[in-house]
Every structure is written in C-alpha cells, then in structure tokens.
C-alpha cells in the first residue's frame, strides 16, 4: 500500500532528526484533464477506512529488513506506527478546481510522509471515476445511469469505482461487493449468453420471466431487435419491466422500439441502452425515447476517467512556509484555507485560496474556522477574503481527523457514502450552469489566490 521511497525518506529523516519536525502536506491538482470543467473529490471515506488499518506488522517488517530497505531503528519505529496528526479535506463529493488543496495532512514529517502513496492512490482513482460519472449524469439529464464496469477493471478497483460513481449520481451498480460494503443499490439481469444457452430467444425470455417476474429487464438484441421486442412482450405481457439494447444505432433503435412497445400494449416498459456509452454519446441521445443507461468501460478506464492528477506536497515546516521552485512544478508555500464564493442567489462564482498568516505558536489548522460548516449554512460576512453583504463564502476544508482520531464515524461505510452522494448533489447544483456542458471547455469556476490574515 506504499512506495519504497516513502520508507527510504523515513529512514534518513529518523537519522537526521527531520522525522520529528511538524509539517503540513497539501493534496491538489495542477490542472484538470483537458476540456474538463470541474473535478469531483471522491474516496475520502475509503481513505479514512484505510488509514485505520495502515500498519506495519511482523511479516511486512521481516521483508523490509531482509531487503535492507529499513534498518533496525526504522523497523522499530514502524512497528509502533500510528498516524497521530490531523486531516482536513473537502467534503466527499465536492467539486474542485486546479490549484485548490482538497486535503491537508498535518503532523510530524515521519508520520505524514508515509501517507502519500495511500492518499494519492485512493483519491486519484476514485476522483477520476467520480468526475467522469458526474459528467455522464449531467448528460443523461435526469435519466438514471447504472454502473456496469466490474468486468473492465481490477477486481478491487471495481468496488471503488462503483462507490465513486454512486457518490457522483449514478443510481445503482452491478457490483455486489459495493452493495455489501457501501450500501450502493444493485442491478442486473442477464447477458447474451443466457439467451444463447436456450433453444430459442422465446425460451430464454420465458425462463427469465418465470424466475424474476414480468417486471424484469429482457436483453433484446442477441439476434434481431424487432423480433426480440416482440418475444419480450409475448413472454412478459403488458407488465414487462424493460428491454435492454446493447448494440446498433441506438437513437434509431430507441425510436423504433418505443413505437413497437406501445403498439404491442406495453407502454410502461422502459428502454435501457448499454454498450460503450460515454457522456458524449449520452448527450447525443438526449432526444431519444430512452429511460436509462448502463455504463462500464468509459467510466472505469483511463480513456473515460483520466486521472485527477493529485499530488502530495510539503508546504510548511515548523510553522514556516516551504515551496518548490521547479520549472513547471512550482508550489505555493504555507497552509491555506479555501472558500467558495456564491452570489446572492446561491450560485458559485469563484474559489478563493487564501495562504494563511500563521500566528506565533500555532501548530494546527483552526478547527473553529475550518471545522466543516454544512453546505446550507454558508455565512456572509467581511473576513479577509473581502466578502460583501451581497455574497456568501463557504469554507471547503473540513476537519476529518484530530490527533489521529476520526471526528465522525458517519464519514465511512454506507452512511458516509450516502452522505457524500447527498453533498455532491447539492454542491453540483450550486455550480454555474456551464458545469453540465460536457463539450470541451474551460473550468466553470475561476480560482483566485490571495494572502489571508
């Protein structure tokens, strides 16, 4: 769950004494993927679960000693490793933009540096899927999107992807473990193999209806869609739940199928489209008489869900700002707070990133000012950000871990997943309307960097 260089840095830092210095790391992306108007933070709940289990046991330490990755002093330190620091982050499901720290880790260098790979591997994967899912939900314009990508990715990634898609607005998943672990509703009926294993399409449909009831979804494109629809209505009658089409000219087939279902006396039967769909295909199908989409490959693979590009960078040591000056990869030193500014109607207009001026002796982010006001309680006022009476600023960084302890058990598991889904729906609705446009474009909010007080 980590990279070797985290441990080699730790070994050297323990020898130099730097491992005990008080530091702040920030997670941010330098740029959104080309053409993307926003990102979506996801995976926070999974990260908090993983943090509790991030330990180095006898077996792991034996390997590290045998390969001389660590010395005895480092092995002894790792044997007692627990993260005792603080973590602040955007609420899971929150849209984000380039240059805004979405997660802040504060503690000793030794404890905090070890979390880099764990943090980035979870947040980069889940946030990539969530951003893609949010774009698809926007393009679907109210029609339900079903996650069906388990067969296109790593088995563990499939569970994480199903959860991230649900956070961003998908309504269900085909992945059973996502339902078991995170409460994501399940969906699924049959594949073409089920039709092919029976003597005829009619026999296959009759068997499925007997087992699952007339409101099941029948896959009608194994041979011929028109014949398949007729066989589906013959098997299930007017209470047929839905038909699924997985290939062909989807717009034309949807129109023809809708007319056929109505003509055969099944006007309530829905039409679900599947088959390598992405947000651009969904946008093109907006006027077609479809009732939902099943989406897999473009959601869970890099082609449809490019990495969020998160990095984990040191910005403060013992209260003093530090920054890289590398060409093209420079950073902004100092801990920061992030405010989302809204107009009087509640529509987001900008993200304000304030580099905090740290009072003498301060060692942690101010929980009172960054402690996670709920979305509906964005206050107005005149802090250093220059808020006017006609605008509202909402603090985006919320305290999740204090002294190594989770602030709220409701952030993890099914409860945390449901909370993240609800938050995303509210936060996305407050973005500019251009956020829902899936064509190639610019970020829908500007990011302004200022010096705070």
Image (spheres, rainbow, N blue to C red):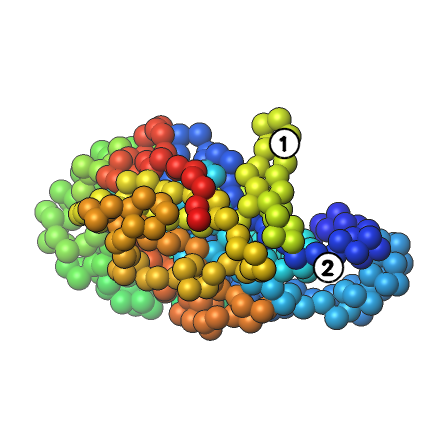
The residue lying toward the viewer, choosing from 304 and 237, is 304
Residue 202 in view (yes/no): no
The residue at which mark 1 appears reads as: 325
The vertical placement of 98 against 422, above or below, is above
Residue 275 coordinates in the image, percent (x, y): 38, 41
Is 58 left, or right, of 256 in this rendering?
Answer: right
| Residue occupying the point 43% across, 55% down | 397
Residue at 79 percent of width and 66 percent of height:
77
Residue 18, numbered label: none
Question: Looking at the image, is 35 positioned above or below residue 145?
Answer: above
Where residue 420 sits in the image (x, y, percent)?
A: 38, 60
Q: Is residue 332 left or right of residue 421?
A: right
Q: Kindly state the secondary structure of the residue where label 2 is placed.
A: helix
Query: CB of mark 2 within 8 Å of CB of mark 1?
Result: no
Q: Residue at x 31, y 67 (%)?
A: 212
Q: Quadrant of the N terminus?
A: bottom right
Residue hosting label 2: 20
For label 2, count other residues whose C-alpha is less than 10 Å away and answer few (under 14), some (14-19) or many (20+). some
Question: Can the viewer see residue 440?
Answer: yes
Q: Compare marks 2 and 1 and give the one earlier in the sequence.
A: 2
Image spot of residue 430 (x, y percent)? 26, 48
Which of the pair 378/223 is nearer the observer?
378
Q: Is residue 35 above or below residue 64?
A: above
CA gap, disc 2 to disc 1?
A: 25 Å
Q: Residue at x 55, y 71 (%)?
A: 405
431 displayed left or right of 325: left
């Amino acid at each position: 769950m980590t990279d070797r260089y985290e441990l080699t840095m730790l070994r050297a830092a323990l020898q130099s004494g730097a491992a005990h210095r008080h530091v702040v790391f920030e997670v941010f992306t330098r740029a959104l993927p080309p053409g993307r108007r926003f990102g979506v933070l996801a995976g926070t709940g999974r990260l908090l679960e993983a943090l509790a289990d991030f330990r180095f046991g006898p077996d792991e330490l034996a390997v590290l000693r045998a390969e001389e990755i660590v010395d005895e002093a480092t092995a002894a330190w790792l044997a007692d490793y627990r993260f005792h620091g603080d973590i602040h982050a955007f609420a899971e499901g929150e849209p984000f933009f380039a240059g805004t720290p979405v997660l802040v880790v504060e503690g000793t260098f030794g404890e905090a540096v070890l979390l880099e790979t764990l943090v980035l591997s979870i947040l980069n994967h889940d946030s990539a899927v969530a951003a893609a899912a949010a774009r698809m939900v926007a393009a679907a314009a109210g029609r339900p999107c079903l996650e069906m990508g388990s067969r296109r990715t790593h088995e563990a990634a499939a569970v994480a992807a199903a959860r991230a898609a649900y956070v961003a607005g998908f309504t269900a998943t085909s992945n059973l473990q996502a339902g078991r672990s995170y409460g994501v509703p399940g969906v699924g009926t049959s594949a073409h193999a089920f039709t092919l294993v029976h003597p005829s399409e009619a026999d296959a449909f009759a068997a499925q209806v007997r087992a699952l009831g007339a409101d099941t979804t029948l896959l009608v494109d194994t041979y011929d869609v028109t014949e398949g629809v007729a066989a589906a209505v013959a098997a299930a009658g007017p209470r047929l739940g839905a038909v699924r089409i997985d290939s062909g000219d989807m717009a034309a087939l949807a129109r023809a199928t809708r007319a056929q279902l109505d003509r055969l006396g099944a006007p309530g039967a829905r039409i679900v489209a599947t088959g390598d769909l992405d947000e651009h295909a969904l946008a093109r199908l907006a006027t077609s008489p479809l009732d939902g989409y099943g989406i897999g490959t473009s959601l869970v693979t890099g082609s449809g869900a490019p990495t969020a590009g998160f990095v984990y960078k040191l910005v403060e040591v013992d209260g003093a700002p530090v920054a890289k000056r590398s060409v093209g990869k420079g950073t902004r030193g100092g801990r920061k707070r992030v405010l989302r500014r809204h107009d009087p109607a509640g529509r987001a207009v900008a993200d304000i990133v304030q580099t905090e001026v740290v009072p003498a002796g301060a060692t942690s982010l101010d929980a009172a000012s960054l402690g996670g006001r709920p979305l509906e309680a964005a206050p107005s006022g005149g802090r250093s950000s220059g808020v006017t009476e006609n605008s509202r600023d909402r603090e985006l960084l919320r305290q999740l871990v204090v002294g190594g302890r989770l602030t709220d058990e409701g952030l993890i598991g099914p409860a945390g997943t449901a909370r993240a889904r609800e938050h995303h729906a509210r936060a996305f609705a407050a973005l500019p309307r251009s956020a829902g446009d899936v064509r190639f474009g610019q970020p829908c909010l500007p990011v302004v960097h200022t010096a705070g007080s």
